[in-house]
Image (cartoon, grey):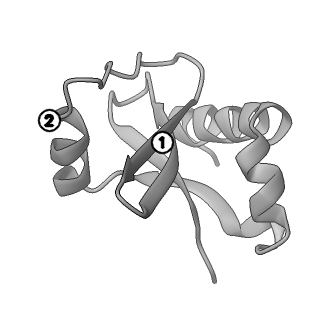
Amino acid sequence: MTTDLERELVAAHRIVAHQHEIVTCWRSMYVPGELRFVPLPPEMEAIIRSSADYDDVVAGGAPTLLSIASGNEALELVLYRASADGAVYMLAPVRH
């Protein structure tokens, strides 16, 4: 039995798989079933929210690609805020 949250995250994953180029890049590194939305750690969310450039991710809205760069370092995250629980999730490789 799947929950509303699980169905919502699967639907968001489908959107990302068809609309975000970064997932195409990740496909060369990961098996498709390894990419899943997982809870964004609170510490990461606090750092992201502290940026003056950050706009909050709308619950139930489209998944959002967030790019962070500083010096020679860069990070790209796909974020999604679920309407089922209001939490922010990030797309990440999950190995079984």
Give how far apart the Cα atoms at labels 1 and 2 are: 14 Å
Inspect the image, locate mark 1, and give the three-letter code of the amino acid beneath it: Ser
The residue beneath circle 2 is: 50
**SS type, badge 2:** loop
Q: Which residue is drawn at 19% across and 24% down?
A: 52
Image coordinates of residue 83 in percent, x first then y, are: 43, 21
25 or 32, which is in the foreground? 25
Image coordinates of residue 53 in percent, x first then y, are: 29, 24
Classify residue 34 by image quadrant. bottom right
Q: Is residue 10 left or right of residue 38?
A: right
Image coordinates of residue 74 in percent, x first then y, are: 46, 57
9 or 25, which is in the foreground? 25
The residue beneath circle 1 is: 67
- As displayed, is residue 11 above or below residue 61? below
Classify residue 10 by image quadrant. top right
Q: Residue 91 got which mark?
A: none
Q: Judge the density around disc 1: few (<14), some (14-19), many (≥20) Cα neighbours within 10 Å.
A: few
Q: Judge the density around disc 2: few (<14), some (14-19), many (≥20) Cα neighbours within 10 Å.
A: few
- As displayed, is residue 42 above or below residue 82? below
30 or 60, which is in the foreground? 30
**SS type, badge 1:** strand
Q: Which residue is drawn at 62% across and 45% down?
A: 2
Q: In this view, does 27 lie to the left or right of 40?
A: right
Inspect the image, locate mark 2, and give the three-letter code of the amino acid beneath it: Ser
Q: In this view, does 23 lie to the left or right of 48?
A: right
Nearest to N terminus: mark 1 or mark 2: 2
Q: Residue at x 18, y 46 (%)?
A: 47
Q: Residue at x 53, y 16 (%)?
A: 61
